[in-house]
Every structure is written in structure tokens, then in C-alpha cells.
């Protein structure tokens, strides 16, 4: 993940533009997202039935869930757990990301 992507994500989490939900990237009502859903949204993805969709990820008529902004599976699981099971607020998740940015930022992209 590039520094700019992390900043956009934490800004999105703190913006108040997103209503926090659990167990889904994007809710049925406008503005409902989990923490990873906010990342997908600020990263410019398209949406299909509440799932992130990137055009280049269509394979044999199906779509794949991509790594948002270069965020690997272990870190996706960590953020999903903080959002869904630990019930951390978006602000708390953003603070965690800022405090631990070395875990999330690819130093080759700084």
C-alpha cells in the first residue's frame, strides 16, 4: 500500500461520510460500509451487489475480490476482525492504522 492510499483510507474513516456496519463491505443503504469497504471505496472500485468489483478481475463471467490497494490477506483479516468482532469505531481503526503504518505501507512505494 502506498502512503497516499493509507492517508486516503484514514481520512475516509474519519470523514463522517461513511456509516459503519459489520459483516459486509457495503450495506444496502447509501453510505454504509465496513472499514475495508471504505478502503475499496476511496480506492475507486466499482460495486456489484455490495461487493467490490474491479473490471480487470472478471474471469469467465465471475468476479474476484481483489486485494484492496495492495493490502494482503492477513492484514485484511486483521482489519475485518477489528471492525466486526472487536467493534472498534472507524476513528479507532484509523488511529491504529496511523500508529502502525509501517505494517501497512510498502516501503518500496513510500
Image (spheres, rainbow, N blue to C red):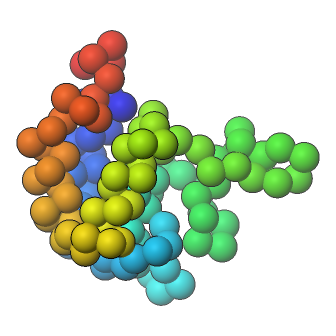
Q: Residue at x 43, y 62 (%)?
A: 37
In which quarter of the view is residue 38 placed? bottom left
The residue closer to the viewer here, 86 or 11, is 86
Give left or right: position of 102 versus 29.
left
- The relative height of residue 31 versus residue 101 in the rendered view (above or below) is below
Give left or right: position of 23 versus 60.
left
- Coordinates of residue 107 in the picture (x, y in percent): 27, 17
- Coordinates of residue 58 in the picture (x, y in percent): 78, 46
The residue closer to the viewer here, 15 or 109, is 109
Outermost residue, top side:
108
- The relative height of residue 78 versus residue 107 in the rendered view (above or below) is below
- Coordinates of residue 95 in the picture (x, y in percent): 11, 53
Give left or right: position of 28 versus 76.
right
Q: Residue at x 53, y 84 (%)?
A: 28
Outermost residue, right side:
60
The residue closer to the viewer here, 12 or 87, is 87
User: Which quadrant of the rendered structure holds the C terminus?
Assistant: top left
Residue 11 seen in render: no
Q: Residue at x 36, y 31 (%)?
A: 1
Q: Give the tally of numbered discs.
A: 0
Q: Residue at x 33, y 55 (%)?
A: 79
Residue 56 seen in render: yes
- Coordinates of residue 78 in the picture (x, y in percent): 34, 52
Amino acid at each position: 500500500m502506498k502512503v497516499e492510499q493509507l492517508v486516503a483510507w484514514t481520512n475516509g474513516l474519519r470523514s463522517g461520510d461513511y456509516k459503519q456496519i459489520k459483516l459486509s463491505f457495503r450495506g444496502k443503504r447509501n453510505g454504509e460500509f465496513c472499514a475495508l469497504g471504505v478502503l475499496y471505496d476511496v480506492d475507486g472500485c466499482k460495486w456489484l451487489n455490495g461487493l467490490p468489483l474491479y473490471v480487470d478481475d472478471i474471469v469467465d463471467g465471475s468476479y474476484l475480490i481483489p486485494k484492496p490497494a495492495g493490502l494482503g490477506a492477513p492484514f485484511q483479516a486483521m482489519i475485518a476482525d477489528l471492525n466486526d468482532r472487536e467493534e472498534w469505531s472507524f476513528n479507532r481503526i484509523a488511529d491504529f492504522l496511523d500508529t502502525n503504518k509501517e505494517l501497512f505501507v510498502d516501503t518500496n512505494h513510500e
